[in-house]
Image (spheres, helix red, strand yellow):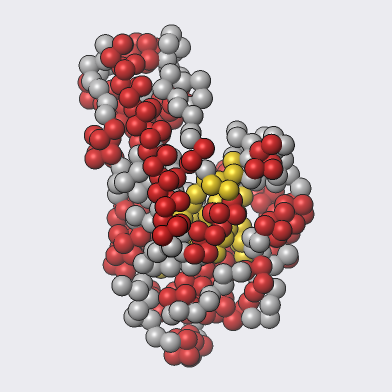
Amino acid sequence: MNAFAGIPGKEEIMERYRRNLRTLALNVNSHIHTPYSFSAFDNMEELFVKARQEGVNVLGINDFNGADGFDEFLRLATQYRIFPLFNIELIGLLEKEQKQNIRINDPNNPGRTYFCGKGLRYPFSVSRENEILLQQVRDASQQQAMRMTEILQSWLQQNEAPFGLTYPEIKTALAKEVVRERHIAKMLRIKMNEAIFGEAEKKRFLRALYSGRDTEADLQNPASLEEELRTNLLKSGGIAFVAESPDAFLPVREIMGIVRDAGGIPCYPVLLDDKKGNLTGFEGDFHSLQRKLQELGVGMVELIPARNDFHTLKRFVKIFDEAGFVISFGTEHNTPVMTPLTLSCRGNVPLDDELQQIAVQGCCLVAAHQYLVSRGERGLADPEDFAKSRNKSDYIELGHAVIEQFINP
């Protein structure tokens, strides 16, 4: 069914919206990974319970390589009266930058580019040609996960581990459709704790798995141990590392075509600064980045403030807001570490009022887009055009009205 079938026409909801003396205050988070890719949350409902506890009333699902979680996300969003944004994330390549050894928004791999689609059509649909491309990406990623699991199982046998691992059991126990590295590491941690008792025994086992290196993880902290297992065994240099197939990455322009075909807005997720203040070659000059994205036809960016310095983020947002970009913010939650859903910068520094307002406006624009597309209209498929238009405030009002109508019908 259409996610917004119960929402009236524009004139009616705008009349109601403008008639209200007080509008609903929005607390937004537009980028959340769920258990349909990998998530800090064990199940989807846990995400919505936490959102309600924190007063977050707009959430954007943002899983890798598919829309498998959309149905459950909408069902729970309707139950909890939290407005749903339907998004997707893919990993692509900028081939020119790859040849030039320029890092984009992956700090370790030149040319590799995380890329999002925002405000996709629900139910999710694309052309047959794009279905094939998406399936190609998913198949390549799962072949890699299967091979990693096979190698790890062989390594466990060599080390006489009192347990084993298989791809089907990992998928059944921890994943929905897609198994990722983090699922493998999580299952390894679970199996180890079920079969090996005592900290000294676990340390001996890990030393063998790590080819003589001692563990430095906090063995009582699941996230710490899983991250170490993933780094030492599954990442480059690890015994079970398998390089990703070229089929797992599409050119960015092809990804943008898929996003637009799915009714969404192409969006570049910004890495920005690391803890040492470093930026990638692609992002280092903010004005240059702005021009590069505009040349690509991208008019929307998204940030994960928790990984950025407040002042650096503020400077970046000012430049891109003045240039007319749509800007959104999220928390990802695609690691085992459970953090608040409420947006903040590195070191738990809260967003100021201006940044909060920009975050809300970005979500309202995406909500307006989703609503218009659900009614067969064009929406905001080319935000580089509409962002500077006189109608931007109208779109923001429409989005806010749609969100309010969904939350308080």
The percent coordinates of residue 396 (x first, y second) are 57, 76
Q: In x, y percent, where is residue 329?
A: 55, 57
Work out which quarter of the rendered image holds the N terminus and state it: bottom left
Above or below 261: residue 171:
above
Kindly tell me whether residue 302 is visible in this rendering: no
Q: Give x and y (percent) for residue 257.
A: 54, 60
Considering every residue shown, the one lying at the far top of the view is 212
Out of 119 and 14, give the one closest to the viewer: 119
Residue 271 picture quarter:
top right
Q: Residue at x 51, y 60 (%)?
A: 259
Q: In which quadrant of the rendered image does the C terminus lie?
A: bottom left
| Horizontal arrangement in the rendering, residue 363 relative to residue 272 (left or right) | left
Q: Position of residue 193 (x, y in %)?
A: 27, 24
**Number of marks in the rendered image:** 0
Residue 209 visible here: yes
Name which residue lies at 64% across and 36% down: 110
Q: Is residue 63 above or below residue 210?
A: below
262 to 135, vertically: above or below: below
